[in-house]
Amino acid sequence: MVKPDLETRFGAAPDGPMDMATMWRRLASRGSVRSFSEKPVDPAMIETLAALALCSPTKSDLQQRDIIIIRDPDQRTAIHACLGDQTWVAKAPELLVFCGNNRRQRRIHELRGRNFANDHLDALFNPAVDAGIALSAFVLAAEEAGLGCCPVSAIRNKPEDVSRILALPDHVFPVAGLAVGWPEEPASVSFRLPLSQTVHIDRFSDDGFDEALADYDTRREAAQPYAKQRFSDEYGEDTSYPWSEDKARQYSKPERSTFGAFIRAIGFKFD
Ligand SMILES: Cc1cc2nc3c(=O)[nH]c(=O)nc-3n(C[C@H](O)[C@H](O)[C@H](O)COP(=O)(O)O)c2cc1C
């Protein structure tokens, strides 16, 4: 029962389910869900999950992240129009937007009459990391409850439009959307790179990367072949289409290349 902990932390707890069980097995077999049943999700459940997400660590206790739960159908429609080809999001019962928020900190400096001496990259970086941590915590808590989720970076495709729709002021920015609902079918487990390349002991090393990548590509392609090859009009259809080819094709084209200009325009500095 987590209600007393939430009440202590927030002063009040939402009216949602509060039971939790061990999560390691679920985490090991988790996967993103992009296809949902029509069964609605209890709004109190979403608010509880948002509260749980905000129990996750936050840099220096600064709490520079916010969650926007989009309930109004017109708001949903307006946001969907910003997501390009991510049309599956419109069928998700719930949509949230995780934001970095450095505005509160700046206001605190005004209220306390103290100079804000950190108007540099940290002012952007810490809220972005904090928002990502909260997103992850939300996903894990939601999956523990049997819900399915998928983050949506396409929320940054048109950041000016999203900011206008969500009334985001300067120094508040979208990090990722999150589609949530009851899964239509169990999530598939997406293979990850070998731990020899992603978990390091004492010091970083990418020795053996090329061989490890080749093994991963082979293992993944045998078990989880891609249904579709990216940009095949330009790059053709390969008989073998491993993960590394998909990622190389993906990032051979610019994605969200105007986001930096948007971030500068809402007041952040990159020095
Ligand atoms: C920050 C972030 C943004 C993402 N944006 C999208 C997105 O816009 N569209 C999408 O279909 N999946 C998106 N995803 C989901 C990833 O594609 C997915 O996590 C990845 O393929 C690994 O699969 P898994 O979560 O099933 O293990 C995003 C994931 C993260 C963490």
Image: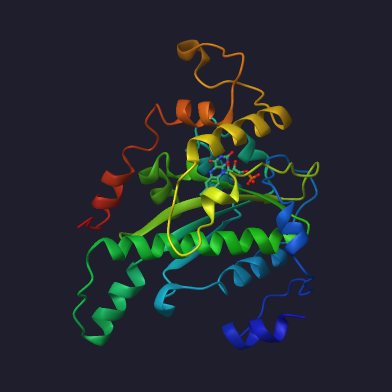
**Residue 126 left/right relative to 77:** left
Give the residue drawn at x 64%, y 29%: 218
- Viewer-proximal residue among 246 and 70: 246
Residue 94 located left or right of residue 160: right
Instruction: Tell me if residue 168 can be seen.
Output: no
Q: Indicate whether 152 appears above or below 64.
A: above
Q: Is residue 249 above or below residue 39?
A: above
Report how many numbered discs are placed on residues in the image: 0
Which residue: 30% across, 59% down? 170
Task: Tell me where residue 201 appears, x and y as whole percent.
Answer: 50, 62
Q: Quadrant of the N terminus?
A: bottom right
Q: Quadrant of residue 46?
A: bottom right
Residue 65 visible in the shown view: yes
Residue 88, given in percent of the width and then of the height, sits at 64, 36
Q: From the top left corner, tell me how far across and down residue 214 is, in percent.
A: 56, 31
Percent position (x, y) of residue 13? 66, 80
